[in-house]
Image: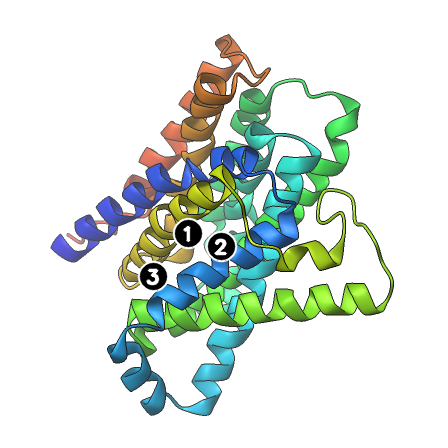
Amino acid sequence: MIETRVAWLQIHLCVVLWGFTAILGKLITLQALPLVIWRMGLVAGALLLLPRIWRVLKTLPRGLLGAYTGIGVLVALHWLTFYGAIKLANASVAVTCIATVPVFLSVIEPILAGRRFQLRELLLGLVVLPGILLVVGGTPEAMNLGIAVGILSALFVALFASLNKRYVLKADALTVTAIEMASGCLFLVILSVALGAADISAIQGIVDEPSAVFQLPQGMDLLWMLVLAIGCTLLPFALSLMALRHLSAYASALAVNLEPIYAIALAALLLGEQQEVSGGFYLGALIIIAAVLAYPLLMRPKPRY
């Protein structure tokens, strides 16, 4: 029980830190593809400087290394589409789309992580959807593509979270983080080269010019990238893996539904985004918070008499 409570504290700290990622994504002027490459590359580079990471890597079975590598590609695709959604819509809309993750997880996690399907989880995920819609509020038609990309990003979260849950006990959190960040970064570099070779000059919201991904971030972009990589990626990603040892991927994702509330409040405060905090925002936030608080009560084992 103590381990579970610590895990809940860890995941809620992750939520607070992740609440800043959308803000930083808006502040950084890089397109989504170079932004994610530098984000993952900086984290991987920092971790691979640690001798203990290399010691563990030498002992990992090839099959397990391959599994973590594949998960890293899914993480990269999630962040690529997430920051694409920010560029195509805004920070508030992007993080709110991610709150659809529990709906996907209620179906995907039992298949990939090998646990029993819970109808209550699916229903609770669906209950959150009206709250998400209220939090987002009315969005202009021009943001529809950003919303679609944001929901695709949520699907990638459900996939990598379920697989991480399946393999989380097989290696320590820092080593897993290093493998997944490095493989994701390498995948995106290869993608950039492929886009350049195919003479694809631009993808809306993702990259203006494939060759631009290899340019160093300059000025404030470099500062914000370091904050994003260390404070909002390395620390919360490792903490979330530690929390997954004692929580289901679904439980973690449901708690992460609080992220839109932090992010939208921060976006309004720091970025002056047009998303005004209205009565609908508070009602939507209340629905999301109620679902997060209800989950441990609904999933509590029934007493035996």
Tell me, yes or no, whether the two marked residues, 2 and 1, touch with CB atoms within 8 Å.
yes
- Mark 2 nearby-residue class (10 Å; few <14, some 14–19, many ≥20): many
In the image, farthest residue toward the top: 279
Q: Nearer the viewer, mark 1 or mark 3?
A: 1
Q: Is residue 155 visible?
A: no
- Mark 1 nearby-residue class (10 Å; few <14, some 14–19, many ≥20): many
- Mark 3 nearby-residue class (10 Å; few <14, some 14–19, many ≥20): many
Residue 267 picture location, percent across and down: 49, 24
Q: Which residue was labeled with disc 2?
A: 39
* Residue ID at (50%, 40%): 219
Work out which quarter of the rendered image holds the N terminus and state it: bottom left
Q: Nearer the viewer, mark 3 or mark 2?
A: 2
What is the three-letter code of the residue carrying label 1?
Ala
Q: Is residue 62 above or below residue 75?
A: below
Q: Is residue 286 above or below residue 295?
A: above
Which of disc 1 and disc 2 is earlier in sequence? 2
Residue 243 picture location, percent across and down: 28, 57
Estimate the spatial distance between the alpha carbons at disc 1 and disc 3, rounded to whole Å. 16 Å
Estimate the spatial distance between the alpha carbons at disc 3 and disc 2, rounded to whole Å. 18 Å
Is residue 243 toward the left or the right of residue 210 in the image?
left
Q: Which residue was labeled with disc 3?
A: 241
Estimate the spatial distance between the alpha carbons at disc 2 and disc 1, rounded to whole Å. 5 Å
Q: Which residue was labeled with disc 1?
A: 229
